[in-house]
């Protein structure tokens, strides 16, 4: 109940910066809005696409060779692939209810999240798992404290955001799901742990690199 109440209160008292974070990391290619009888699909980048965009931004800033850019994009893509498989296995094993459904039933039937609730189970957070896994690989390839400006969402009408490291970006992506009202805190935090394990597994599988 404490986690449920936290999501409820976060959305009711959302600050502008937290709302901006939620919207920046929404990455929902299935978002729908309504105008009268019309259902309008909002085209947005996917979570994996967002991190592929970050990989491209980082490659450009680091001025890597074409071969290195291909390697970096390939490693991030393969890692994201494993991350989503791992996450979705857990989602359907846990099969946990979303905050919106539980809050509407137990606290307030009129409550709505900031973001549209996705049509699949809640635990763990896909954004958290995918983002943390990509951050592990990008940090290994390009270094810790690699600052960059994420312009991935400009095409979709959102301003760029600055980050001091890939982990800072992945942590923000994770907590954005709590701010958006679509995940409980433990799904975000446990998703980070899961994602880091996936990232380390990817490095081990592709390069034989063992990380603690």
Image: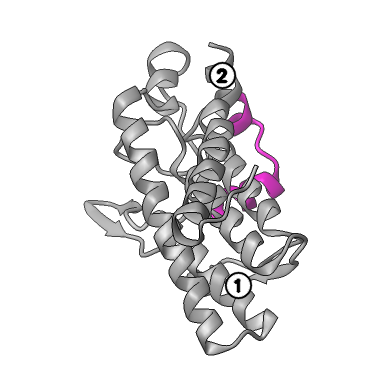
**Closer to us: 64 or 2:** 64
**Closer to us: 103 or 171:** 171
Q: Residue at x 47, y 80 (%)?
A: 70
The stretch of residues the image draws in magenta is 9-24
Extreme left residue here?
37
Numbered label tally: 2
Extreme front residue here?
208
Magenta span includes 19: yes
**Closer to us: 99 or 124:** 124
Q: Secondary structure at mark 1?
A: loop
Whether the residues at callouts 2 and 1 have beta carbons within 8 Å, the answer is no
Task: Quadrant for residue 109, please give it.
Answer: top left
Q: Main secondary structure of the magenta part?
A: helix
Separation (CA) of disc 2 from disc 1: 32 Å
Q: Position of residue 40 (x, y in %)?
A: 29, 59
Q: Secondary structure at mark 2?
A: helix
Q: Residue at x 54, y 54 (%)?
A: 25
Q: Position of residue 65 (x, y in %)?
A: 59, 88
Q: Is residue 107 left or right of residue 154?
A: left
Q: Position of residue 72 (x, y in %)?
A: 52, 72
Q: Tell me, for residue 151, which label it has, or none.
A: 1
* Residue 136 at least partly seen: yes
Q: Tell me, for residue 3, which label it has, or none.
A: 2
Q: Position of residue 46 (x, y in %)?
A: 40, 59
Q: Residue at x 62, y 30 (%)?
A: 10
* Residue 95 at least partly seen: no
Task: Quadrant for residue 159, please give it.
Answer: bottom right
Residue 176 versus residue 59 in the image, above or below: above
Q: Tell me, for residue 43, which label it has, or none.
A: none
């Amino acid at each position: 109940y404490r986690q449920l109440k936290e999501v409820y209160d976060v959305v009711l008292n959302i600050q502008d910066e937290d709302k901006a974070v939620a919207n920046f990391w929404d990455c929902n290619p299935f978002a729908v809005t309504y105008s009268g009888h019309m259902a309008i699909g909002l085209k947005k980048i996917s979570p994996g696409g967002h991190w592929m965009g970050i990989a491209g931004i980082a490659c450009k800033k680091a001025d890597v060779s074409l071969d290195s850019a291909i390697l970096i994009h390939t490693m991030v893509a393969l890692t994201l692939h494993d991350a989503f498989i791992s996450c979705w296995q857990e989602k359907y094993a846990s099969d946990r209810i979303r905050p919106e459904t539980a809050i509407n039933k137990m606290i307030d039937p009129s409550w709505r999240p900031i973001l549209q609730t996705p049509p699949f189970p809640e635990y763990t957070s896909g954004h958290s798992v995918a983002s943390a896994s990509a951050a592990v690989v990008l940090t290994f390839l390009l270094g810790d404290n690699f600052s960059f400006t994420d312009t991935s969402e400009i095409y979709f009408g959102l301003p760029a955001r600055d980050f001091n490291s890939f982990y800072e970006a992945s942590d923000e992506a994770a907590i954005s799901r709590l701010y958006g009202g679509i995940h409980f805190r433990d799904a975000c935090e446990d998703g980070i742990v899961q994602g880091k394990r996936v990232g380390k597994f990817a490095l081990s599988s592709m390069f034989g690199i063992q990380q603690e």
